[in-house]
Image (spheres, helix red, strand yellow):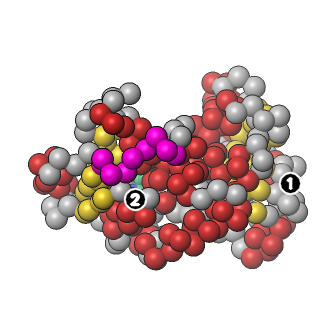
Amino acid sequence: MTRLTDDDVKGISDTLDELDAMLREKAGRGLKSIACEAAGVPENMIDPRIFEIAVVPITSGLGVISRFSESVRDACRWLGFESYVTDGTDVTGFADAVDRKASIIFMADDYQYVAYNTAANRQADNSTGTAMGYVACLDASAGGVRGKDVLVLGAGRVGSRAARLLTDKGARVTIADIDLPKAEAVAASIPGVKATGDIPAAISSNNLILNASPAHVDSELIRDGTIISSPGVPHTFDEAAYAKATIIHDPLVIGTAAMLMMSASYSQHGIIR
Ligand code: 2YJ
């Protein structure tokens, strides 16, 4: 799985309004609306005032990413939730958050990024949140995916979840991966999904793409008017790709916002779902 870098995260806190505006322009809905849609909760059901969000910096593995925790905090604040980064890291930070009665605790190591709802004793994970968030973006931008062909690039944790969500929404899904057996395994587990290893052919024959892969997509292959919902990092689409396609990407916030709304929905108004 690709790990975010300091550069991926730099500037996120200062560009949340821009991200919201980009989503309104390309998907017709803002960040909060996309996140609630992704989480399957009506916007008016989530009352941010009853939650307090803690973000715990995690030093294990490759260590802290500069401004990762602050960016998560600022995204939660932007969505109207009181949020802070704990002074301590790792277990000490988690203990601080529990002592302060945080309702949702965000933390990420090199493999997992979770939002833990303390009252519900339930976690929302980032792969699921990211898949839900970017499926919601694609669905909104395309005016619905029902009955349409959608290509999912990458058969990892996000791509496989996205393939299932898109199928549930009535799309005809093809999943592509350079590791064909991996794509075939995902296809075999979801009725109706096809697998391919011919990625260039798949890109040039699809107008709707969910890119959950770190691979570079050659702009030559992209059809004019394609919609690409792209959580994949590194994000290497060039100007030529942006000129041809509607491309929706951010490295952290869409997935985080979906996790937050999912997690909040687990214990809204004291009702544990
Ligand atoms: O606390 C920190 O600053 C770091 N430990 C954050 C690490 C962030 N983790 C990643 O970027 C991993 N790729 C995990 C993300 C899960 C993606 N579904």
Badge 2 crowding class, 10 Å Cα cut-off, few under 14, some 14 to 19, many 20 or more, is some
On residue 204, which mark appears?
A: 1
Q: Residue 49 in magenta?
A: yes
Residue 10 falls left or right of residue 230? left
Quadrant containing ligand 1: bottom left
Q: Viewed as shown, does residue 227 lie left or right of 63?
A: right
Q: Pinpoint residue 117: horizontal percent, then vertical percent.
A: 30, 40
Provide the major secondary structure of the magenta segment: helix
In the rendered structure, the answer to whether residue 202 lies left or right of residue 152 reads: right
Magenta span: 43-51
Residue 62 visible in the displayed image: no
Spatial CA distance of label 1 from label 2 is: 41 Å
Q: Secondary structure at mark 2?
A: loop
Query: Residue shown at 29%/34% (left/top)?
Result: 270
Which image quadrant for residue 195? top right
The residue to which callout 2 is attached is 80
Compare residues 47 and 250 and report the one nearer the observer.
47
> What amino acid does circle 2 point to?
Gly
